Image (spheres, grey):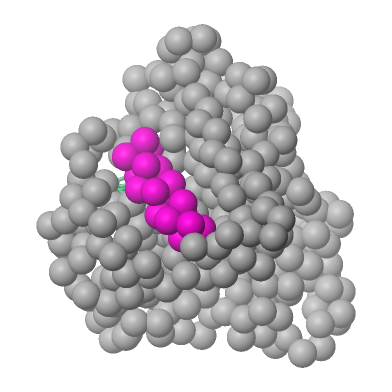
């Protein structure tokens, strides 16, 4: 039988990045182990604040090239509070990577593993289950690379919406919905922002191509309310960059916080998978961090690879997490438990 080898770039990064990534790599490898027709070739690449301190660049070209040429990237977290560019700006190599690889589709799955994890006390495991599809390359974040006239008296940020960018993100959202419960909610602010009128217009064009999919349109302020009042009603939520950024954190809060929320940033032929949280410098190096978000991101990575065995390994890893988390005692400190990072990894490995 011929074996297919997948090149995976592993960017552990800073803070708790290396601790959570270590568990994810271990579980990802274990999930693939029984499959004789696939093999993972893992390449560790140094990026982030520690790399900047060594070489003056948090995302060197050599590291970027490895990412671009790999089949997929697994990323921990990057940055250190004390390490900034000489002009004082914060470093955001993870956003640079997303933009340079044109990873337009920001997938943020939200799933409730146990009733105890949610601050909303009325939901059982599996009753909160939706995915946010965040447009990753334009929207209000376009202001980052296209600063307008800034004076000491006035500064503006541009909300950029293009037909091309909107078409591709809406297609991605409807394709997701076709594999799920066939409902898409557009979150916009078309009552106030003219850019959002175009966004909604393109949404309606794409919706017409998917007659089986139910659609709903919600203003972003109402979306924040409905996420708390009726999270079970959402299947796929699609929105622009900044709204997606904010609502993803709110949504993660519904199911236990940042330590439980994975993500994938997906482009035409490259993808980066990483936890939604940052480097958590306050608990770095203490074997306390919750590795679940990174392990779930690794499961997404496997399911994204173009091979039935890799997909099956990803589904198995996802099920192992579900099984492990069904026991409310199997939790790290951030979700009310007492397990260490490595013990959490052990518990999931046992279920695999
Ligand atoms: P960044 O700027 O890198 O996004 P941040 O300041 O927004 O970082 P996080 O690093 O996400 O924040 O951390 C916010 C809080 O959540 C911290 O108190 C941190 O300890 C906690 N936290 C984040 N991720 C985890 C995790 N995986 N396990 C446990 N606690 C976490
Ligand atoms: Mg943050």
Type of secondary structure dominating the magenta stretch: helix
> Which residue appears at 69% of the width and 27% of the height?
65
Q: In this view, does 173 lie to the left or right of 294?
A: right
Which of the 4 image quadrants contains residue 49? Answer: top left
Residue 279 lies, with reference to residue 261, above or below; the image says above
Q: Looking at the image, can residue 118 be seen?
A: no
Q: Residue extending furthest front? A: 1
Which quarter of the figure is the N terminus placed in? bottom right
Residue 282, position in %: x, y?
Answer: 23, 36
Q: Which residue is drawn at 73% across and 73% down?
A: 175
Please say whether residue 27 is one of the residues in the magenta stretch: yes
View quadrant of ligand 1 = top left
Query: Considering only vertical position in the picture, is 144 above or below 179?
Result: above
208 vs 47, nearest the viewer: 47
Residue 251: percent from left, percent from top: 43, 66
Q: Give the range drawn in magenta.
A: 17-33
């Amino acid at each position: 039988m011929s074996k297919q080898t997948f090149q995976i770039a592993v960017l552990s990064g800073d803070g708790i990045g290396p601790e959570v990534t270590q568990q994810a790599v271990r579980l990802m490898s274990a999930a693939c182990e029984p499959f004789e027709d696939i093999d993972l070739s893992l390449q560790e690449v140094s990026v982030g604040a520690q790399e900047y301190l060594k070489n003056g660049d948090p995302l060197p070209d050599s590291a970027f090239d490895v990412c671009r040429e790999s089949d997929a990237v697994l990323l921990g977290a990057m940055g250190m509070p004390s390490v900034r560019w000489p002009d004082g700006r914060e470093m955001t190599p993870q956003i640079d990577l997303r933009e340079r690889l044109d990873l337009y589709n920001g997938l943020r799955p939200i799933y409730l593993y146990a009733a105890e994890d949610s601050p909303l006390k009325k939901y059982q495991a599996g009753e909160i289950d939706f995915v946010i599809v965040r447009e990753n390359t334009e929207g209000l974040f376009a202001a980052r690379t296209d600063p307008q006239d800034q004076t000491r008296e006035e500064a503006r940020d541009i909300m950029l919406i293009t037909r091309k960018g909107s078409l591709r993100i809406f297609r991605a959202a409807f394709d997701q919905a076709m594999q799920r419960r066939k409902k898409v909610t557009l979150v916009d602010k078309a009552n106030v922002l003219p850019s959002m009128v175009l966004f909604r217009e393109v949404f309606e064009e794409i919706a017409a191509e998917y007659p089986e999919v139910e659609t709903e349109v919600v203003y972003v302020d109402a979306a924040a309310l409905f996420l708390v009042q009726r999270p079970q009603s959402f299947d796929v939520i699609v929105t622009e960059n900044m709204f997606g950024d904010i609502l993803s954190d709110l949504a993660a809060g519904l199911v236990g916080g940042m330590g439980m929320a994975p993500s994938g940033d997906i482009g035409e032929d490259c993808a980066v998978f990483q936890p939604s949280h940052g480097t958590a410098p306050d608990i770095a190096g203490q074997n306390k961090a919750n590795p679940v978000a990174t392990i779930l991101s690794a499961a997404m990575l496997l399911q994204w690879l173009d091979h039935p065995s890799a997909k099956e390994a990803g589904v198995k890893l996802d099920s192992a997490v579900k099984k492990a988390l069904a026991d409310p005692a199997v939790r790290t400190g951030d979700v009310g438990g007492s397990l260490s990072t490595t013990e959490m990894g052990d518990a999931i490995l046992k279920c695999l």
